[in-house]
Every structure is written in C-alpha cells, then in structure tokens.
Image (cartoon, rainbow, N blue to C red):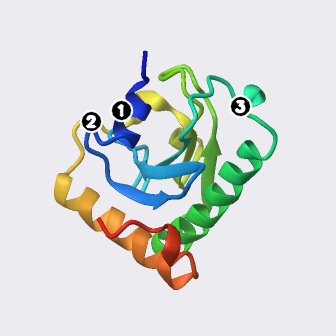
C-alpha cells in the first residue's frame, strides 16, 4: 500500500514542491513547525533511514542541507532544525525548518491549520533561494 508521501509524489494528493529529482523530492509540511518547514522524501518507499540504499540517504541529506541554507538565509533563525522521526508516516522523511529554540522540535506545537497564503509565499521564497543557489534544474516551476 502506497504511503501518503508516495501519493503526494505521484500527484494523487496536492503538495507544495520545492525540489524534485530522480531520487528525492522536497515539499512543505502541511503541519509546519515553522515557516518554510520542508520534508525531504525519497521517491523510493524506505521505512527507516538505516534501511536506505547506499547513496540515497547521503543524497537526501545533501538536498536537506541545500534547503536548510535557503531557510537560514530567508528567515534568519539562530538554527535550522534537521530531524528524522519517522513515527508519523512509515516512509523516510527528513524535516528541515527554522528553529528559534528547542520547542521547534515539539510536534505537538505544529500548526494544524496554517495560513495558505503564507504557505504559498514560503514555497516561492524557498524555490527562489534554491534557484539563486544554482539548483534551478531541480526546482519545480509550481
């Protein structure tokens, strides 16, 4: 059975994509822990990061680092959070988002009904930052 992330990747469920290549995608979380909260997700359904094939996890982390740099430059948080929890969806995903304190790691504080106009601005800001950093080939137009 396909995970919710596979359904997003396949276009069965809408997503706000900031990255797409042959191995991974990046899209905004629907329950963000901060502005520009992105999930980096392999196209392949891998349950746990330790089970990722050689090279896939490293590539996902490199994409997360590039996205994290844009998040840092856009929102100027003291830290950019990187987290792999994996309990919510059994499909490897890396959370990348701005962090102003340890509360940024508390999923109970995630927005359940984020402002959709703000989400649209966040996705466009990240796409623009990734294009400016030379990653245009992996940045979807919309």
Q: Quadrant of the C terminus?
A: bottom left
Sequence-wise, the earlier of marks 1 and 2 is: 1
Residue 70 is left or right of residue 126, and the answer is right
Disc 3 on helix, strand or loop?
helix
Q: Nearer the viewer, residue 79 or 53?
A: 53
Residue 136 is left or right of residue 59, and the answer is left
Residue 138 is left or right of residue 14, and the answer is right
Q: In front of the other: label 1 or label 3?
A: 1
Q: Residue at x 70, y 58 (%)?
A: 62
Q: Residue at x 36, y 40 (%)?
A: 10
Sequence-wise, the earlier of marks 1 and 3 is: 1
State yes or no: discs 1 and 3 in contact (Cβ < 8 Å): no
Image quarter of residue 141:
bottom left
Find residue 12 and name its label. 2
Whether residue 85 is situated above or below residue 124 in the rendered picture: above
Give the CA separation, mark 2 to mark 3: 24 Å
| Residue 70 rendering spot, x and y as whole percentages | 54, 71
- Residue position for label 3: 49
| Residue 121 rendering spot, x and y as whole percentages | 27, 67
Number of dots carrying numbers: 3
| Residue 30 rendering spot, x and y as whole percentages | 32, 40
Whether residue 79 is situated above or below residue 72 in the rendered picture: above
Disc 2 on helix, strand or loop?
loop
Q: In front of the other: label 2 or label 3?
A: 2
Image quarter of residue 133:
bottom right
Q: Quadrant of the N terminus?
A: top left
For mark 3, does the 10 Å Cα neighbourhood hold few (<14), some (14 to 19), or many (20 or more) residues? some
Find residue 142 and name its label. none
| Residue 14 rendering spot, x and y as whole percentages | 25, 43
- Residue position for label 1: 7
């Amino acid at each position: 059975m396909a995970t919710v992330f596979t359904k997003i990747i396949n276009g069965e469920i809408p997503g706000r994509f900031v990255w797409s290549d042959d191995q991974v995608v990046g899209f905004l979380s629907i329950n963000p822990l901060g502005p520009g909260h992105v999930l980096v997700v392999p196209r392949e359904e891998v349950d746990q990061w330790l089970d990722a094939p050689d090279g896939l996890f490293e590539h996902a982390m490199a994409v997360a680092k590039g996205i994290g740099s844009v998040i840092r430059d856009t929102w100027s948080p003291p830290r950019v959070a990187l987290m792999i929890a994996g309990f919510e969806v059994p499909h490897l995903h890396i959370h990348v988002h701005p962090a102003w304190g340890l509360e940024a790691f508390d999923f109970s504080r995630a927005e359940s009904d984020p402002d959709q106009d703000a989400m649209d601005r966040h996705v466009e800001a990240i796409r623009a930052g990734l294009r400016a950093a030379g990653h245009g080939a992996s940045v979807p137009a919309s």
